[in-house]
Image (cartoon, coloured by chain):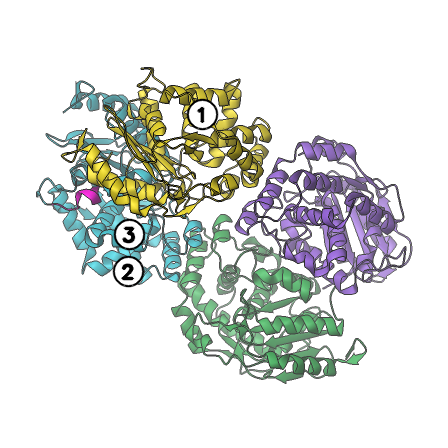
Chain colours: A yellow, B cyan, C purple, D green
């Protein structure tokens, strides 16, 4: 694949070399011990064009905690299952405030702004508990199908650690339950929610796993349609407006592609009909997104000229 | 131009015929007498492909009050003039709350969320008062250049009416002044702000006026670059995430194109490298955007298959 | 005792006769089944002067769920134990918003406004878990000492019912825990909190139990000082400014005495050096306070001319 | 007069001597130049018992800017004129947030919490513009009657300075106007409001001027009833719950008397049937109240044992 008149490979390689000295930028998430001990110097980039090899650099094969990127998979599972009915219990608007804020949730009667903030993901989790006998098994099965790799699993230590330090998420979940927007027990919802967050995947695997979003909903490995073209388009729009918490507007402005981030330091993004991309650098900026990742992606879309706008 | 294997003209014509019976949907803005008396039955659509004639239907040649669509032109003027320095005094994030809310503005020390909410547009207006001797003359001159039509002007009656009923906007402006984020007198800022809002243009003129945003910043009539390609891309991203007040997420989800709306009932949107489009129907939904316009645009992107995602 | 030149007994009797036809005013709390089934027609008044018999009318001997009135006893226990140190983890200001709002609690980093809103009472409960081996035993023992009646106990059914429907209170407690302002497990805190709320007492018993607040801290039955004169004065001031949730200002304006209310429909108040008074009528106004109770107390202070102002 | 077995004079004198070395405590209000230049070392105390001489210490005869203490006089004028009808446009509850916050005002549709925060005082001012031909003349006339001193006037420089720096107050006023809760022009309301704030009085004059609040509404100089006994009682209750902005709860807890403060550093308080008291020290605490004044008053009520609780 070419971009701006050059082979994509050499552009990405050049950028990776350029950004490598900035490894360690930002502050590693430390709200749970299991995340705090991650080596901040790690940096991986994977670019998967629609055709051809995955371009992998640095720690692109190292698995890390995908954290909130899991919200994307959980949401698409519920969206595929329920269609537009998912919107009966949550919204599609940017949150405007911190990703784990209770204020907005209280003011809006327990209806979360979108599926990519914590509260919204819990409502999705609550739906999955209705829709599947063993939703965690299904989620992992989905990831196996999307990546062709069946060793993807969640990290028991991170999961336990999240549960132990999950007071604020428990507050969010109980608040929604008080409004009747959580149907299962808070304990069950949090359990599944934290399990999802603690899934480990590599940049390469993540870039592969979202190929369907760049291909109108079709998983290229199986040839099967996971989402309809319309659902795919809409999921991408949702990622653009809400995928990076309350930095979504700035990210759209600077980078201009649908993406989803996690506090593990990963960011997965895509340009429809062109490519998918993942960056991983554990250091976060003040808004909880990977600082080096955002800087890299801004330069990546600038140099390649690839953009949805 | 073709889309989904059909001539664009016949798709748009078909859609217009289909939506025409729904004229009068929604509630005309009535906060000032001059707007309240507009005939709710009017409905116009203009689609301007990059090549070829403008496709005009219904009341596409009737001028109406562009209201907040003027924020787009004021912003691009300031952005062209100051570049990234505009962000020193306002943000790029969706607001999450009502377009004229003081709450967020107070909590965030008088720094508006983005240039497309009222408070942000006032900061832009304050900048224009610094940058130009006669900013209203310059704004009209810009609209004349972009449309090739030099009779575009503001409506004196609407302007006076806005001033007379502008208590909430005065509150916003004084609040920002108390934080030092308005440099000129509140009276001067409101004066210019309301003048901008009361500009009258037709669907055809609006579709022509934003062609530069679909053409990497170049005004096709003059061949001159108004914004750089990078600034153009970024302006489009900003429109997508914040152009429809706190309905931006839902609009991105349903319609999926950069757009800007006004309480006069107009919506102007675009698909880069493809076309620009304007709809006008004065009836608004509960969030202050043209109800028929949004419904039409959703179906327009669905039928044509044109989308940025 | 005389007031306004008449025997207190005849004033209170007259008032009770006058207000009796309005029994059933307001809306009985229905957030838990155990409270919803209370007979709304019940109405009791007990006035206990410093000297002489308790003046009892209507259902003054019927025990009811004291609910938030328990916050007064829990607070005084902690205040007696810790003195001014109690203020290290909560405030003394009126809340200004609803008694179970999370918004303020989040904005103020998990520090509740005062000990008489739910969140503040949970912090007090958390302190009692540190200060006593069996705090519920101690609380009941205190009530036995203050009233001379050792059959006062909590209601098992109400307690279980509160626990089962306590999602919003769990949200409050987890939110404070996330800020580090709850030291024990949320489960233990809620358990003790709901047990306190479900204590049952009669108007006569309540009027007796707060005599120490009208007597500079001394329990007249034992002659022992429970609070110092300064602590007593301060507790009374706190009741006046925060004892009736966000109706405290209006109550102070209309009635003008330190008081504490509960959603069971009880209100206990006092005039230092003069008397204590309890009303009970299960119907609540929109702000969660007994409607007939407030109306009665306003007329009571007006007719007797007794007031702290 | 005696208190705690000693002559009141010697208690106050002792306290004044004790607190004098702490002159200069806190931070002088500097939001307008005319206030910023006040000598921070000034300290005055005036205690006026119901019978006998006024006890004056330090700078008790020096006039200073009474600022928000004027809200008490404006309110009582409107209350005397309109009775309970004043409550049709404002509340009686503590504000819970900063005295000049727009957030609450917006959330509560332009109805201020109480007459002692800025927004509430502006509504009162708006009422006075209806009730009197020349309300400033009437306010000064009232102060002359209450003090027996007809040289009390407002300070032209402070008034001009307030107007010039009044953006936040203009924002509050325009916001209320947008809700229809200001009837006159914002300009006229602010003009009268700032004139009231810039009245200058001494501690001695202030202590005399509120004697009617300690005497069931009767001005002792004229023998005339200015407020009814019931209105007086209610005004005192309002001062207790809302007189010190969002420090009202703490002040009630520590000092325990109805009082009103101003950013000029004055505090005026009273104990019904006993005395009135004024302190003046320009240094403010973080909440905008005189720091030395509050400390002095706490000790004053502690030593004398005088309290309403």
Identify the mark at residue C289; answer none if there is no mark: none
Q: Secondary structure at mark 1?
A: helix
* Subunit that carries the residue with mark 3: B
Residue under label 1 = A86
The region drawn magenta spans B225-232
Residue A165 image-quadrant placement: top right
Give whichever of discs 2 and 3 has the lower sequence position.
2
Image location (x, y in percent) of residue A1:
19, 28
Identify the mark at residue B188; answer none if there is no mark: 2
Q: Is residue B145 visible?
A: yes
State which quarter of the image contains the N terminus of chain C. Answer: bottom right
Image location (x, y in percent) of residue D195:
47, 72
Residue B230: say if magenta: yes
Which of labels 1 and 2 is toward the front? 1
Residue A255 or D49: which is nearer the viewer? A255
Which of labels 1 and 3 is toward the front? 1
Residue C32 image-quadrant placement: top right
In three-dimensional space, the C-alpha distance between marks 2 and 3, rounded to whole angstroms, equals 10 Å
- Answer few, some or many: residues within 10 Å of disc 1's Cα (few below 14, many 20 plus, some between 14 and 19): some
Q: Are marks 2 and 3 on the same chain?
A: yes
Q: Is residue C285 above or below residue C161?
A: below
Residue D83: say if magenta: no
């Amino acid at each position: 694949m070419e971009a701006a008149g050059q082979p994509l490979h050499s552009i990405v390689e050049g950028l990776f070399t350029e950004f490598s000295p900035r490894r360690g930028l930002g502050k590693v998430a430390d709200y749970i011990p299991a995340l705090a001990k991650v080596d901040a110097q790690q940096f991986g980039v994977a670019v998967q064009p629609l055709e051809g090899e995955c371009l992998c650099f640095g720690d692109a094969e190292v698995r890390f905690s995908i954290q909130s990127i899991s919200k994307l998979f959980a949401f698409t599972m519920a969206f595929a299952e329920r269609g537009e009915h998912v919107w009966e219990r949550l919204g599609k608007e940017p949150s405007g405030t911190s990703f784990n804020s209770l204020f907005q949730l209280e003011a809006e009667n327990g209806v979360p702004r979108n599926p990519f903030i914590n509260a919204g993901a819990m409502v999705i989790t609550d739906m999955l508990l209705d829709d599947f006998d063993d939703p965690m098994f299904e989620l992992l099965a989905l990831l196996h199908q999307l990546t062709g790799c069946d060793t993807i699993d969640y990290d028991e230590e991170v999961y336990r650690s999240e549960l132990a330090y999950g007071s604020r998420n428990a507050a969010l979940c109980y608040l929604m339950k008080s409004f009747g927007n959580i149907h299962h027990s808070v304990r069950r919802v949090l359990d599944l929610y934290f399990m999802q967050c603690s899934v480990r995947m590599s940049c390469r695997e993540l870039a592969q796993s979202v190929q369907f979003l760049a291909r109108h909903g079709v998983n290229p490995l199986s040839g099967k349609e996971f989402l309809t073209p319309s659902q795919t388009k809409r999921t991408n729009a949702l990622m653009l407006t809400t995928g990076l918490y309350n930095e979504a507007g700035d990210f759209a402005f600077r980078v201009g592609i649908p993406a989803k981030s996690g506090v593990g330091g990963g960011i997965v993004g895509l340009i429809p009909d062109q490519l998918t991309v993942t960056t991983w650098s554990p250091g976060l900026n003040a808004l909880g997104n990977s600082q080096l990742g955002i800087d890299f992606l801004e330069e990546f879309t600038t140099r390649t000229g690839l953009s949805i706008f």
